[in-house]
Image: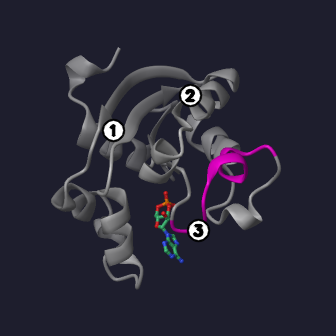
Amino acid sequence: MTNRTFTMIKPDAVENGHIGGILEKITSAGFKIVAMKYTQLSTRDAQAFYAVHSERPFYGELVEFMSRGPIVAAILEKDNAVEDFRALIGATNPAEAAEGTIRKLFATNIAENAVHGSDSDENAAIEGAFHFSGREIY
Ligand code: CMP
């Protein structure tokens, strides 16, 4: 899965009409979309996806937020995809995100921060497989 990362356009950005704007930033930055779907996480899906954060004080809020409405899930391909995508989306807290980053442009706050980006090649593979079967990746 080297050169691939996984992203979600989160419920806040979908609710605020930013799917098109975010996809435009992603493709303009040279990422190829190799899998994509419009879907909604159940409570159980969100609990499982964010299990690594289950001890954090914001876990309940995070699960409720991520399951409250539809998301766009996608696998993206580019050289150095994980690192370059995290640079494109900016800091977790949009108040600290660099100018021009997706979170600076489109995020609501630290909890509702518009997009997810995998933090390693290993997690990109795990997260991509959570949402897509092999025959949904092109
Ligand atoms: P992300 O980095 O994609 O994955 C973990 C998510 O937890 C993060 O985005 C935010 O949506 C959420 N999160 C991180 N820090 C906080 C916080 N301090 N309060 C509430 N939610 C948070």
Q: Disc 2 vs disc 3: Cβ atoms closer than 8 Å?
A: no
Specify the amino acid type for callout 3. Answer: Ile
Q: Nearer the viewer, residue 19 or 73?
A: 19
Res 128 label: 1
Q: Disc 1 vs disc 2: Cβ atoms closer than 8 Å?
A: no
Q: Alpha-carbon neighbours of circle 2 within 10 Å: few (<14), some, or many (≥20)?
A: few
Instruction: Locate residue 105, reporting x and y percent.
Output: 71, 47
Specify the amino acid type for callout 1. Answer: Gly
Res 16 label: none
Closest to the camera, between mark 3 and mark 1, is 3
Q: Is mark 3 within 8 Å of ligand 1?
A: yes
Q: Residue at x 38, y 68 (%)?
A: 62
Q: Is residue 136 left or right of residue 85?
A: left
Q: Quadrant of the C terminus?
A: top left
Res 110 label: 3
Distance from the alpha carbon under mark 3 to that under mark 1: 23 Å
Q: Going from the N terminus, do you reach mark 3 or mark 1 first?
A: 3
What is the count of numbered marks? Answer: 3
Q: Where 24 falls versus 138 (above or below)?
A: below
Res 20 label: 2
Closest to the camera, between mark 2 and mark 3, is 2
Distance from the alpha carbon under mark 1 to that under mark 2: 21 Å
Instruction: Locate residue 93, reporting x and y percent.
Output: 65, 66
The quarter of the picture where residue 18 lies is: top right
Q: Nearer the viewer, residue 119 or 99?
A: 99
The quarter of the picture where residue 37 lies is: top left
Q: Which residues are the magenta region?
A: 100-111
Q: Alpha-carbon neighbours of circle 1 within 10 Å: few (<14), some, or many (≥20)?
A: many
